[in-house]
Image (cartoon, rainbow, N blue to C red):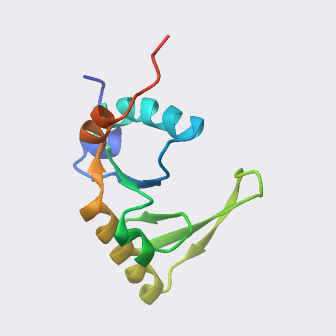
Amino acid sequence: MEELGPRIAEGQWMGRVRVVSEPHSDYTRFGLALAEHNTAAGEDIRYLPRHHPVVAGLPDHDFWLIDSTTLLLLRFGEDDVLLGADVVTDPAVVVRHCYYRDVARHHAVPWSEYSTRVHLPEGP
């Protein structure tokens, strides 16, 4: 098992939900393969297929939540390159995004289960 990240070793939770299109793009398959290392280090990575009915009630933008108090709304260019993030601390907006996170997480499948359903790229 890989060494736990310092925040996880201190008892903090770190996780994400990836809403993915199926069939997967090359980028999604690459991310699935890399997730093995993140999950081994303690991160909770889950997958939610875009066709799942709950996705219709989720926002169509990517975001990060930091300690459920700070929201980062991610901005991407036309070529899907991350341009930056807008920091939001308005409690009403942050709490709404905590709700989105919790709904997505509830319906998403952990990487360990999802990865057995899909073909992962072979390692070197």
Q: Image point 49% across, 71% down: which residue?
A: 71
Q: Quadrant of residue 84?
A: bottom right
Q: Is residue 8 above or below residue 60?
A: above
* Percent of width and height locating residue 105: 30, 61
* Percent of width and height locating residue 32: 43, 36
Left or right position of 15 against 90: left
Q: Quadrant of residue 35?
A: top left
Confirm whether residue 5 shows in the render: yes
Total numbered labels: 0
**Residue 8 vs residue 23, the one in the foreground:** 23
Figure quadrant of the N terminus = top left
Q: Image point 44% across, 29% down: which residue?
A: 33
Given the current orientation, which residue lies at the most extreme top position? 124
Q: Quadrant of residue 68?
A: bottom left
Q: Image point 36% across, 30% down: which residue?
A: 36
Q: Is residue 7 above or below residue 63?
A: above
Given the current orientation, which residue lies at the most extreme right position? 78
* Percent of width and height locating residue 82: 68, 53
Confirm whether residue 101 shows in the render: no
Given the current orientation, which residue lies at the most extreme bottom position? 92
Q: Is residue 23 above or below residue 76?
A: above
Left or right position of 82 against 72: right
Q: Image point 26% across, 37% down: which residue?
A: 112
